[in-house]
Structures are given as structure tokens and as C-alpha cells.
């Protein structure tokens, strides 16, 4: 045990504050989850009800209005596919930048970041018109491609920072054995940096799942993800808070559970190369 | 002898260079297309008088820009865009720092408490905005108005009297966990012995933080600020769900201006001109950060 840790172990102030902050930050989610199981009257009751007879009627009402599983499937497909493709595209580039750096590497990196700085609205009109011309409006394919491209610069950057931590000698050894770059990448680098790749993937998936701008503007009932479903549900059912809460809970539940189970990876991994 | 070694190394580097550059090609080429095609088309359309409801397009010169820069709303929109970047930036970095310090030390149930803190990050912006708008900020049935009444205060109608503050609160709530995660990771990579040494030297907690921890956090903070700026420059869903840019133009930022003024009016020319302007703003902001970050790469 490290010195000092026994001393801070029973730090009552830290314990109380730590729990208060945790409960406070997640309270809106908890409150929404409660409202999802209330009747409309209970959801709008003053004073607020913490104890009530739970009901599933909101979820029934939601499933009559929205094809939940269809949109959930779209969300899953778009976030997985766009992240996997982005990692597949990014990994070779990150490998070259990390281990075969040239005088262009830095400029290349900054150029990629500067693309991510371009606001999506700036590209919306051309992309929209291209998609109309190609008959790709409201398709999962279009959403996967766009989400993938908009996350690609960040994913290159994250992978680069993880690859950079691997000592060059290890790859050098592989090179002596005659391993070609792609084999080095596949058999040495990827297994070595798997935790980093996992957290890159996690972040990519969370960003893709929560992405709303492209989704609202280029998809509708066919390819719309849960982000679109909830936005349109809010337009039609805006006054029915309990139903809205049920739909909200249903649309964040998958990524929330996924995030909770993988958060350790996320906590360890998000350095963006900022830590030496 | 040494010449052969150099030659050999040189030859190998050359051979290596020839072998690796194709690996860059996939991502560089798609990003190049992703950048250039929309950019060129946006520039082209910005010079057209083109409304989807009354085609065909006609060459309009700089008329779209003229309209844009004489629109009295534009200064407000630019100001709102900057407010919506810097407001949440300040809040999330400060809170994230405080939370990171809090969760850096051990206490019973830290794992669960940390899980609770990062929960908002998994909530999609549309849902977060809905929850805050209906369940918290509503002037009659919202939880906040109930709390305010408990204390004998007049309930605040957030979205009509402080719309910008309300949107900033929502955005900050979503992104504070991200700031906490990055800063906490950075803090935990800090050499414990260094802190311990400072403590044994008699440094108080505050001066330990300022002189030992904070210098270590400079890089993570600048990375964090850059990433968040990227996301805050395009804040959209939070506005779409709550205020629709209003009341008036009180919460209209650049993305929402383009959406409401140009897209809903099917005015491709104006939307493109405004899009170019948004890119310009983003690049001005990006320039400062990228310059800073590039020192760290």
C-alpha cells in the first residue's frame, strides 16, 4: 500500500461530497426514469411524487406510436458500423504517423483536426443535395458514411496517441523477422494497444449514438436513429411528459447500460496523448 | 565500412517509405473528399440565387453575403455562438477539475459514485434537453420551480427570462463528465511520489495542487478545451428541442441560424453563404487552439 492512502481512506468530507456530486449529476436521469413509470397526473404532480403506483402504460403508448426496435436497430447499426469502419481506416494511418514519422506528419495531423473543426452546418447543403441526387436520403448507408467521416479525425488522433506509447524497438524486432507493415500492425501493434483501441471505439460509438444533427436533417422514418425518434416524438407528444420520459428512457437505455459496463475502459483510456 | 552502413540504412528507409505511404491513403483520401467536395459546392452555391422552391439557380454574385452581413441578427448570432462555446467551456473545465480532484482520492463507494457522475455523458443531447426543459425548468410543474416555491421565491421561467443560461446549463451538464474523465485520467497518471515528496516538504494541499498537479494538467486541459470547442461550436440538438433559437434570437447560434433562416426557407444560396461564414468563425477559433495543441504533438 502506498504511503498516504491509509490516511485518506476515511476522509469523511471526500466521501460525503463524492456521493453528493454523483447523486446530483445523475439525478436528472433518475428523475426521468421515475417519470417514465408514472401516470401523466403523477408526473406533473405538485409537490413531486417520489412514491407512486408504477405503470407500464407509457411504454405501451410509445410502442403504438414509434417503432422502437426499428430505430434502436438503426442506432446500433450506425454506431457500430461507423466506428468499426473509422477504426479500420484510421489504424494504418495512425501506424504510419506514429512509427514512420516524416516532416509531413505533424501537418497531416493538424489538417485532420482542422477538418473536424468545420461545422457540420457548413457541409449540410452540399451533402443533402448529393444524397438527393444519389437517392440516398434517409438510408442507413448515408448515415454510416457521414458519421464515420465526421468521427474519423478524432479516431486517427486517439489511435495515434496509443500507438505512440508502444516502444519502437518492439516493432523493430518484428521488422527484423521480416514482418510487413500491415502484419506488424495486425499481429503486434493491435494486440499491444487493444485497451486503447477499445476506448477509442467506445468513444466513437457514444458520439455516433448521440449524434443528432445529421440524423435530424438527412434521415426520417426509414433510417432514423433513436435520436431522431425522440426528437419527432417530442414534437408530437410534447405535452405528455410521462410518455416522453418513457420514450427518452428507452432511447438512452442501451447506450447507458453499455457505457456503465465499459466505463472502466473509458476512464483509463481518454488521454488523447495528453499524458506523458 | 561506415559508408556501407549509412547506405544500407538509407536504402532501407527509402524502401520503408515506399512501403508505408499507401497505408495513409485510405483515411487521407476520404477526408480530402469529405473536405473539398462540400467546400467547393458551398462556395459555388453561395454565389447563386437558388431557392429549392423556385428553381432554377441564377448567378447572384455576392448578394447572399450582402444579405447576410446586413442582417441585423448576425452580430447577435455570432455573439450567441461564442457564448455557447465559452460558457460551457468555463463551467465544464472548472467543475471537471473540481470533480477530478474529488474522485482522485479513495473513499468508500468511489467506483459507484464515479459511475453516477459520468452518467450524463451517455445521455443523448435531445433527451437531456427534453428532461431539463420539462421536468426541471418548467415554470409550473418543473422540479426547480417547486424548490423555488419551497423557499418562498417566485418561480423562474427559465426559457423566457434566462434562455441562454438554461441552454448553457444543459450543455454543461452533458459535457462535465467528459471533462472529469479526461482530467481524472491525467491526474491518476501523475507520479504519486512527487506529491508525497511535496507533502513531506510541508507543502499545503492548495500549494501542492498549484505547483505539482496543475503544471501536469496543462496539456490535458488544452486538449480538453480544444475537443470541447469542436463540439460546442456545433451545438444544435439542445436548441432544437428547447427554444428553437428563441425567444426572438436569444439562443440562435450559427448552426441554428442556418437551419432556421436558410434551410426552413429552402434558400440554398443564403444557407451556403452562412455556412461559409460559420466555417470562417470555426477556423478563427480553431487557429488559436490548433496552434497551441501543435506545440504538444
Image (cartoon, coloured by chain):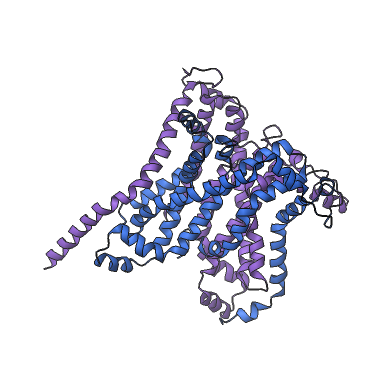
Q: Quadrant of residue A94?
A: bottom left
On the question of residue B133 being in view, the answer is no
The residue closer to the viewer here, B209 or A199, is A199
Query: Chain B in the picture: what colour?
Result: purple
Q: Residue at x 53, y 52 (%)?
A: A205
- Residue B64 on image: x %, y %: 52, 23
In the image, taking residue B153 as reference, residue A236 lies left or right, namely: left
Vertical comparison of B12 with B88: above or below: below
The residue closer to the viewer here, B48 or A247, is A247
Residue furthest to the right: B152
Q: Residue at x 70, y 32 (%)?
A: B248
- Residue A203 on image: x %, y %: 53, 55
- Residue B16 on image: x %, y %: 24, 56
Q: Residue at x 76, y 50 (%)?
A: A56
Q: Quadrant of residue A212?
A: top right
Quarter of the image with the N terminus of chain A in it: bottom right
The residue closer to the viewer here, B113 or B67, is B113
Quarter of the image with the C terminus of chain A in it: bottom left
On the question of residue A267 being in view, the answer is yes
Vertical comparison of B50 with A100: above or below: above
In the image, taking residue A177 as reference, residue A276 lies left or right, namely: right
Q: Which chain is blue?
A: A
In the image, taking residue B88 as reference, residue B292 lies left or right, namely: left
Vertical comparison of B117 with A76: above or below: below
Amino acid at each position: 500500500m502506498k504511503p498516504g492512502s491509509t490516511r485518506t481512506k476515511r476522509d469523511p468530507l471526500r466521501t460525503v461530497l463524492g456521493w453528493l456530486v454523483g447523486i446530483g449529476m445523475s439525478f436528472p436521469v433518475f428523475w426521468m426514469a421515475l417519470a417514465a413509470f408514472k401516470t401523466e397526473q403523477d408526473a406533473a404532480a405538485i409537490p413531486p411524487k417520489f412514491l407512486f403506483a408504477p405503470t407500464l402504460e407509457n411504454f405501451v403508448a410509445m410502442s403504438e406510436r414509434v417503432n422502437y426496435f426499428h430505430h434502436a436497430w438503426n442506432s446500433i447499426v450506425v454506431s457500430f458500423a461507423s466506428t468499426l469502419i473509422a477504426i479500420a481506416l484510421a489504424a494504418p494511418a495512425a501506424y504510419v504517423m506514429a512509427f514512420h514519422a516524416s516532416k509531413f506528419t505533424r501537418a497531416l495531423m493538424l489538417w485532420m483536426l482542422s477538418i473536424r473543426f468545420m461545422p457540420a452546418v457548413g457541409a449540410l447543403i452540399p451533402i443533402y443535395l448529393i444524397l438527393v441526387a444519389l437517392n440516398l436520403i434517409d438510408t442507413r448507408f448515408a448515415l454510416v458514411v457521414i458519421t464515420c467521416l465526421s468521427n474519423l479525425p478524432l479516431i486517427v488522433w486517439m489511435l495515434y496517441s496509443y500507438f505512440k506509447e508502444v516502444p519502437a524497438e518492439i516493432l523493430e524486432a518484428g521488422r527484423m523477422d521480416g514482418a510487413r507493415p500491415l502484419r506488424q500492425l495486425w499481429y503486434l501493434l493491435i494486440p499491444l494497444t487493444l485497451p486503447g483501441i477499445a476506448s477509442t471505439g467506445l468513444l466513437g460509438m457514444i458520439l455516433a449514438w448521440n449524434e443528432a444533427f445529421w440524423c435530424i436533417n438527412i434521415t426520417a422514418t426509414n433510417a432514423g436513429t433513436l435520436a431522431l425518434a425522440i426528437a419527432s416524438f417530442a414534437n408530437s407528444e410534447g405535452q405528455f411528459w410521462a410518455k416522453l420520459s418513457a420514450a427518452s428512457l428507452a432511447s438512452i437505455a442501451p447506450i447507458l447500460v453499455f457505457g456503465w459496463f465499459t466505463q472502466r475502459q473509458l476512464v483509463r483510456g481518454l488521454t488523447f496523448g495528453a499524458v506523458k | 565500412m561506415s559508408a556501407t552502413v549509412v547506405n544500407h540504412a538509407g536504402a532501407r528507409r527509402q524502401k520503408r517509405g515506399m512501403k508505408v505511404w499507401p497505408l495513409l491513403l485510405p483515411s487521407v483520401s476520404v477526408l480530402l473528399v469529405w473536405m473539398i467536395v462540400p467546400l467547393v459546392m458551398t462556395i459555388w452555391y453561395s454565389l447563386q440565387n437558388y431557392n429549392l422552391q423556385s428553381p432554377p439557380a441564377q448567378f447572384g454574385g455576392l448578394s447572399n453575403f450582402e444579405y447576410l452581413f446586413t442582417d441585423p441578427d448576425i452580430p447577435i448570432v455570432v455573439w450567441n455562438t461564442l457564448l455557447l462555446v465559452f460558457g460551457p467551456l468555463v463551467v465544464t473545465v472548472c467543475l471537471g477539475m473540481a470533480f477530478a480532484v474529488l474522485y482522485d482520492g479513495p473513499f468508500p463507494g468511489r467506483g459507484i459514485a464515479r459511475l453516477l457522475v459520468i452518467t450524463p455523458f451517455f445521455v443523448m443531447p435531445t433527451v437531456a434537453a427534453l428532461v431539463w426543459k420539462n421536468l426541471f425548468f418548467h415554470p409550473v410543474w418543473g422540479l426547480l420551480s417547486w424548490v423555488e416555491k419551497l423557499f418562498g421565491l417566485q418561480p423562474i421561467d427559465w426559457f423566457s427570462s434566462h434562455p441562454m443560461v438554461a441552454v448553457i446549463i444543459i450543455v454543461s451538464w452533458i459535457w462535465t463528465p467528459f471533462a472529469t474523465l479526461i482530467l481524472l485520467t491525467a491526474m491518476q497518471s501523475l507520479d504519486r511520489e512527487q506529491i508525497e515528496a511535496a507533502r513531506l516538504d510541508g507543502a499545503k494541499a492548495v500549494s501542492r495542487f498549484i505547483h505539482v498537479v496543475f503544471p501536469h494538467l496543462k496539456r490535458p486541459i488544452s486538449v480538453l478545451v480544444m475537443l470541447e470547442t469542436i463540439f460546442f461550436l456545433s451545438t444544435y440538438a439542445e436548441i432544437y428541442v428547447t427554444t428553437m433559437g428563441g425567444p426572438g434570437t436569444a439562443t440562435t447560434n450559427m448552426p441554428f441560424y442556418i437551419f432556421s433562416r436558410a434551410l426552413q426557407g429552402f434558400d440554398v444560396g443564403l444557407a451556403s453563404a452562412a455556412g461559409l461564414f460559420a466555417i470562417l468563425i470555426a477556423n478563427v477559433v480553431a487557429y488559436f487552439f490548433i496552434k497551441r495543441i501543435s506545440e504538444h504533438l
